Image (cartoon, rainbow, N blue to C red):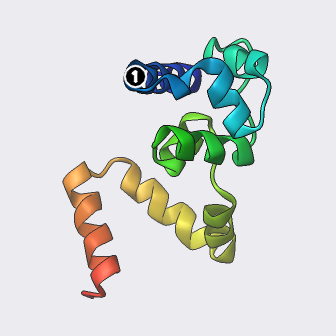
Amino acid sequence: MNFGELVRKSRLKAQSEDRKYSLRKTAVRVGIQPSYLSKIEREELPPPGEEVICKLSEDLGLDTDVMLAMAGKVSTELLEVIRSRPELFAKLLRELKSAPDHAVLKLVREVRDGEW
């Protein structure tokens, strides 16, 4: 699934339960033109910038980091973390690339809980 499909599918699912998720109303809440949102959903335009993606993800109840990743972007916050130790994070990400999900989750829990 690509970014536009994710946005459209999520918006239409929300719209089936609440009319406030029409294309027009969603676009207004996010601060963009309805035609722009339509073109994003149909992949006629590339994904928008971080600010719009964050507003869309909040409005649709989606994970911002997932939305940014689907758009081929990384949040400013994560970029700052990576830039603080670029060599170390590059090595870490390359190693994690082939690790199974359960191993990555275990590592995340260990870091979060401080169990070194």
Query: For this rendering, which residue is in front, 83 or 15?
Result: 15
Q: Residue at x 63, y 51 (%)?
A: 74
Establish if 15 lies above or below 88. above
Q: How many marks?
A: 1
**Residue 106: image x %, image y %?**
22, 66
Check disc 1 and report its element: helix, strand or loop.
Answer: helix
Q: Quadrant of residue 48?
A: top right
The quarter in which the N terminus is drawn is: top left
104 vs 6, left or right, is left
Q: Quadrant of residue 82?
A: bottom right
107 vs 14, left or right, is left
**Residue 103: image x %, image y %?**
22, 59
Establish if 62 lies above or below 13. below
Establish if 75 lies above or below 8. below
Most extreme residue toward the front is: 19
Query: For this rendering, which residue is in front, 104 or 35?
Result: 35
The quarter in which the C terminus is drawn is: bottom left
Question: Residue under circle 1?
Answer: 13
Query: For this rendering, which residue is in front, 114 or 63?
Result: 63
Q: Residue at x 69, y 28 (%)?
A: 27
Q: Residue at x 64, y 45 (%)?
A: 55
